[in-house]
Image (tube, rainbow, N blue to C red):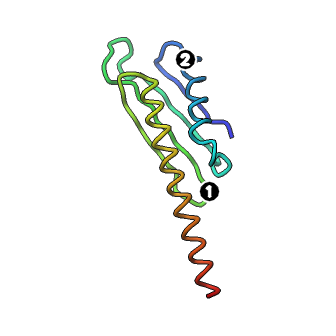
Amino acid sequence: MKPVIIAKGLKAQRAIRDYAARRFDFALNRIQHNIRAATLRISDKDGPKGGIDKRCLVQLSVPGLPDIVVTETAHNVNVAIDRAIHRAAYTAQRLLARAKSFSYTKHHLEFA
């Protein structure tokens, strides 16, 4: 599964997209087969003014679960990407583990 990466208002958009794709592949490697769709939206709210305004929004669609949406804002675009992807991966892994545990418990109790 390849994520859709949308970058607006940033210099070197190609390099940022490549970085985000690598980080996404690394962070979600173990659970990629469970993810139906992924979108990363990267933006710079204030443009050349500077400040803590680089934003990364990650949205993951996992079948049978609500969408996972994580937003991070930072001074550096790479930091915002890293934090957002890390939080989304952690959340997805936790929700999938809970769903698996619940499914196992429910199945186990039906036949006990």
Q: Quadrant of the C terminus?
A: bottom right
SS under mark 1? loop
Looking at the picture, which amino acid does disc 2 mark? Gln
User: Which residue is more in the foreground, 110 or 52?
Assistant: 110
Neighbour tally class for label 1: few under 14, some 14-19, many 20 plus, Cα within 10 Å: few
SS under mark 2? helix
Q: Looking at the image, do the residues carrying marks 1 and 2 touch, with CB atoms under 8 Å apart?
A: no
Q: Name the residue under label 2.
A: 13
Within the image, what quadrant is residue 22 found in?
Answer: top right
Q: Which residue is drawn at 56% across and 24% down?
A: 19
Q: Name the residue under label 1.
A: 63
Q: In this view, does 111 lie to the left or right of 79?
A: right
Tell me which label, 1 or 2, sits earlier in the chain: 2
Percent from the top left, x then y, of residue 32? Answer: 65, 45
User: Which residue is more in the foreground, 11 or 74?
Assistant: 74
Looking at the picture, which amino acid does disc 1 mark? Pro
Neighbour tally class for label 2: few under 14, some 14-19, many 20 plus, Cα within 10 Å: some
Q: Which residue is drawn at 63% across and 42% down?
A: 29
Q: Is residue 25 left or right of residue 46?
A: right
Q: With respect to residue 67, does 13 lie above or below?
A: above
Please state the total of marks drawn on the protein image: 2
The disc at residue 31 is none
Percent from the top left, x then y, of residue 56? Answer: 45, 32
Cα–Cα gap, marks 1 and 2: 31 Å
Q: Which residue is drawn at 54% across and 52% down?
A: 93
Q: With respect to residue 30, does 96 lie above or below?
A: below
Q: Residue at x 62, y 44 (%)?
A: 37
